[in-house]
Amino acid sequence: MAKKQTDKSEKVTPMVRQYNAIKAKYPNYILMFRMGDFFEMFNDDAKVAAQILGITLTRRPWGDGADMPLAGVPYHAVDTYLAKFIRAGKKVAICDQTEDPKKAKGIVKREVVRIVTPGTILESDILDDKAHNFLAATCERKAGGDGGAVWGLAVADLSTGSFEITEFSGPQAARQIFSEIGRLQPAEVLLPDALRRREGEWLDPAMKTTLSWLPETDFETLSARRRLLDQFQVQSLEGYGAEGLDAALGAAGALIQYLRDTQFSVLRHINHLNVYNPSDYLVLDFTTQRSLEIVQSIHGGGRAGTLLEVLDHTVTAMGGRMLRGWLLQPLKDTKAIRDRLDAVEEIFNTPTLRSNLEDCLRKVHDLERIISRIGLGVAGPRDLASLRQSLQQVPTLVDAFSGRKGGAAAQRNLGENTLEVEPETNGPKSSLLNALRDRLDPHPRLLSLLERSLVDAPPYTLRDGGVIREGYNSDLDELRNLARNTSDWMEQMRQSEIRRTGINNLKIGYNKVFGFFIEVSKGNVANVPPEYIRKQTLVNAERYITPELKEKEEVILHAQERIVELEQRLFEEVRNEAASRTRSVQQLADAIARIDCLFSLAAAAIAGNYVKPEIHEGDGIDIRAGRHPVIEALQSDRPFVPNDVHLNNQKDQILLITGPNMAGKSTFLRQNALIAIMAQMGSYVPAKSAHVGIVDRLFSRVGAADDLARGRSTFMVEM
């Protein structure tokens, strides 16, 4: 008689069976599987994790006599390990327990609650405060006639809620769009499977980005458009100027679908679509960026030795991100440039304004990322406390523009006994500063709610308790009082019952078997009220309970548990109220970031002894006594020798620069490129005077091995 075949899957434990079922849905991800206080990884995931994270690889019984490799990390430190996975280019699926293990019948329910990829990071410990973490998507559409292809690009930052699209068309469209991707340097790029055969054709190998391939259907225009209409809750995309941009909409729809698939939550903080045209800005391709070391040094890839390091005096993280964007996307609109320069000039010339702005901005947290975490429902108590502190600074920030005194900073010492006090003003003279001041909404109702509901210094997580302020909710206050003062409550109830019944020796007690009880001596049993329910008979006494006592028992015994649940509910109500104001808080954050950028440029101008450039509509550049801003800042031990440049499209189109090695040829070339970038972003420039016509594109590929900050030329390095 043949033995009955037993399926191998029947031999494994229920937990392993559950793990295998979930892992089958996410085969290309590291699955972090929550078990108690640890996130465990099994089999090949465990081997990879042990190598990347530097943790011990162990083994666990499989259930059929075999063992499975196992590696785990504490759940409370998961952010640290996520960072290592992301830096290694891995994607992670986080599988958490979705029910209380104490209440579970059988195996605890578990589900993947979030997927983390390089372009979908939210953890502040992983993100660079002063750089965007972009997720990009691109796709191609065939154009009619001989127009070639149309390429669409969508770019979002999940951590801030920014979302932009653009298109390129014509024979050079493919090169243009990947040049734009090079400018943005996204952490991750989404591409349709059809482009996989052309992988490696466009992206510069020096770009550190993850490519993720998606089905063609994710980029289909009609379904993508429906996704966007649903995302923004509108009937048409015409208000965003996006109708008819089929390639860009296809990319945007795929990007939104990817975010929905990875976040498992409503993306309420992505509520606006910006359509931009790269031709409105000075074009800086990736090679030029690297050569000029605008935001990244060639040697090491950090900020040290870059133009960004010299100009970045921003006080807030969101201001730092915006300044980086201004540097990589200088303006071509002369009015917009002059508006920025006028604003910088006013801050430059007004010490009180400068001092007051800095004082206020130092107390403003990263509103963009805070409100994004709130919108995604992952913000903790300290996020809301940071939002509260930031909103508290808004009225003071408004006052700073009104010329109100900032104390000693408003006075200038002119001599031993002489002080000059800056006069009061009614507001800034700059139209841009006026417009930004008018956008500073203090959100009084939201601020009042945050002040009433949250304690001054809340704990990091809700599970630590003590988040909601005393007096905010009477039920919570009562529970806390019960948890703290059970003996006081028992005595108060005893006195109340003595008065009600006339039984002077009545007692209220508690034991683990019977819970709370009222004890009455045998001689007073006749005086017991009818609502008393006999619970236990003793030799000399009877013990009773009442509906009120039973209710209080339930409350007291489960007070701490109910405190946690009620605090959770109250906190979520407050967080949801803040989330309902996501768009207006984002607009406030944008205004503050712009103010911070203008402050930063004024501070850099003072530190570097820069001058205000003259921007004109012509095609000439005339710079007198120009200096290289980075070299001058880094080599302060010896003066930089200034030099002039005069170029136009009539007689002086080309300059032929000659000289021996280390004579400064590359320095001169890059210096003038950087001055043009600074002028068009709205910054003062390192020169005696500068008259700059609008530049539409810069090319720089000189001295591939130059290290100007250290005084090394390509020839010297090669030798």
Image (tube, rainbow, N blue to C red):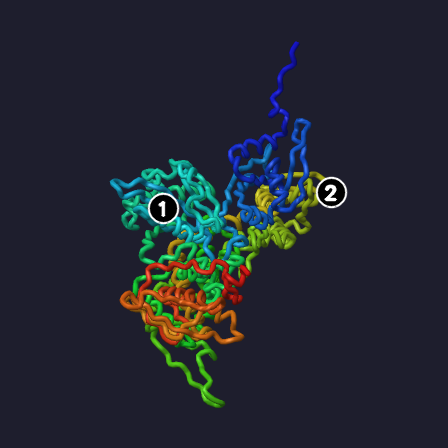
Question: Looking at the image, do the residues carrying marks 1 and 2 touch, with CB atoms under 8 Å apart?
Answer: no
Crowd rating for badge 1 (residues with CA inside 10 Å; few <14, some 14–19, many 20+): many
Picture disc at residue 540: 2
Quadrant that contains the N terminus: top right
Viewer-proximal residue among 513 and 71:
71
- Toward which corner of the image does residue 344 lie, by quadrant? bottom left
- Toward which corner of the image does residue 444 lie, by quadrant? bottom left
Amino acid type at image mark 2: Asn
Crowd rating for badge 2 (residues with CA inside 10 Å; few <14, some 14–19, many 20+): few
In the image, taking residue 157 as reference, residue 95 lies left or right, namely right
Which residue lies most toward the top here? 1
Picture disc at residue 212: none
Viewer-proximal residue among 668 and 183:
668
Q: Looking at the picture, how far across and down is residue 204, in whole percent?
A: 45, 49
Precedes in sequence: disc 1 or disc 2: 1
Query: Mark 1 to mark 2: distance in Å?
Result: 95 Å
- Which SS class for mark 2? loop
The reply to whether residue 269 is visible in this rendering is no
- Which SS class for mark 1? helix
Which residue lies most toward the left here? 145
In the image, taking residue 102 as reference, residue 391 lies left or right, namely left
- Toward which corner of the image does residue 2 lie, by quadrant? top right
Residue at the disc numbered 1: 174
Q: Looking at the picture, how far across and down is residue 28, in whole percent?
A: 52, 37
Residue at 35%, 40% in the rendered image: 224
Q: How many marks?
A: 2
Amino acid type at image mark 1: Ala
Q: Looking at the picture, how far across and down is residue 381, in whole percent?
A: 52, 54
Quadrant that contains the C terminus: bottom right
Residue at 45%, 43% in the rendered image: 200
